[in-house]
Structures are given as C-alpha cells and as structure tokens.
Amino acid sequence: MPFSADGRDSGARCAFCAIIRGETAATVITETGHLLAFLDHRPLFRGHVLLVPREHLRLLSDLPAERAQEFLTTAQRLERAVEDGLGAAGSMILVNNVVSQSVPHLHLHVIPRNPGDGLRFWLGPRQSYDAEHPAEEYAAKIRAALPPG
C-alpha cells in the first residue's frame, strides 16, 4: 500500500526510499543506521550530496528530535568533506519543505560553491518590510505558531 492509514505517502513509490532499499543504484558517500548520503544524480555542480533519513519522512519538522543531532552533525561532516575534498571555496546547505521539493522525502543538499560558478537563483525577488507589511507583524504570527521547545 503506497499510503499509510493517515494518508501520508509510506515511501513505497519514493525515489529515495528505492535507493535506501537498494532497488535503485546511487553513489553512496556515507551511511549510518539512520541516514544515507549519496551523490545527487542531477547535480547543480559535481559533488552535490544529498543526505536523507532511512525512514520515510517528508519534512524537516517530521524528523524525530532524537535523530536531529545525528542529522545535523552528519550534514556538518559532509559540508567539510565537500569543501575540503573538492577544493570548493564554500558550500550551500539547503532543505526544501514541499515547495521545490522534487522528491517527497526529507533531504538536505550539500552543494559545492565557488566564486563565479554561475548559480544565481538565490538572488531571486526580495521583499522589504514596510509600513504596509511591518516586520513585527510577521514575527508575531510566527511566534504565535511556534511549537513548544
């Protein structure tokens, strides 16, 4: 069954779950009992790594708190390895939730970056706060929706 009782995708049709199950080949960088890191098959730049939990989760907020430390420290290790191993000047660390999430499975990108590499999408439209859209109004809405820590 592709969906669980609560209507969520169970991972049966998920491209990343197929990699985790060994049904689809991937170039693995590192793995643990809970995580798998592999090269993106359509990288922005060569060396673009994806880090995924082995459990099918869609959003960063779905990641259990007890797994967050391992996820983040593995991302930090990958950041250093991508930059140092490839001689990159820096990296971009990115997690998409729903919008722009091409595979509905939590994944963190570690993308090598260099000056003049041509990547410009991050400089997209910007919106300023102003009298009609005060920053404090947006902050108050976010604070009100913030789950307990």
Image (cartoon, helix red, strand yellow):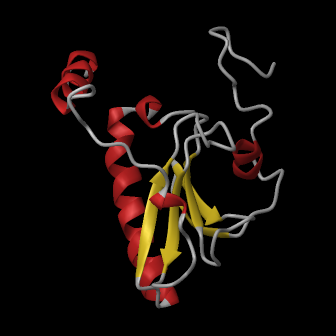
Relative to 12, does residue 75 appear above or below in the rendering? below
Relative image position of residue 124 (x, y in whole percent): 49, 54
Residue at 78%, 31% in the rendered image: 12
Relative image position of residue 63 (x, y in whole percent): 44, 35
Q: Is residue 82 left or right of residue 36?
A: left
Q: Is residue 6 left or right of residue 18?
A: left
Q: Nearer the viewer, residue 89 or 15?
A: 89
Q: Nearer the viewer, residue 114 or 38?
A: 114
Count the marks: how many?
Answer: 0
Quarter of the image containing the C terminus? Answer: top left
Asked if one can make out residue 106 in the rendered structure from this viewpoint, the answer is: yes
Residue, far top: 5
Q: Nearer the viewer, residue 109 or 123?
A: 123
Q: Is residue 5 left or right of residue 146?
A: right
Residue, far front: 131
Q: Nearer the viewer, residue 11 or 61?
A: 61
Quarter of the image containing the N terminus? Answer: top right
Residue at 55%, 81% in the rendered image: 117
Relative image position of residue 87 (x, y in whole percent): 47, 91
Residue, far bottom: 87
Relative image position of residue 131 (x, y in whole percent): 20, 29
Residue at 18%, 21% in the rendered image: 140
Asked if one can make out residue 147 in the rendered structure from this viewpoint, the answer is: no
Q: Please identify the quarter of the rendering in which residue 83 is found.
A: bottom left
Residue at 47%, 49% in the rendered image: 125
Relative to 82, does residue 41 appear above or below in the rendering? above
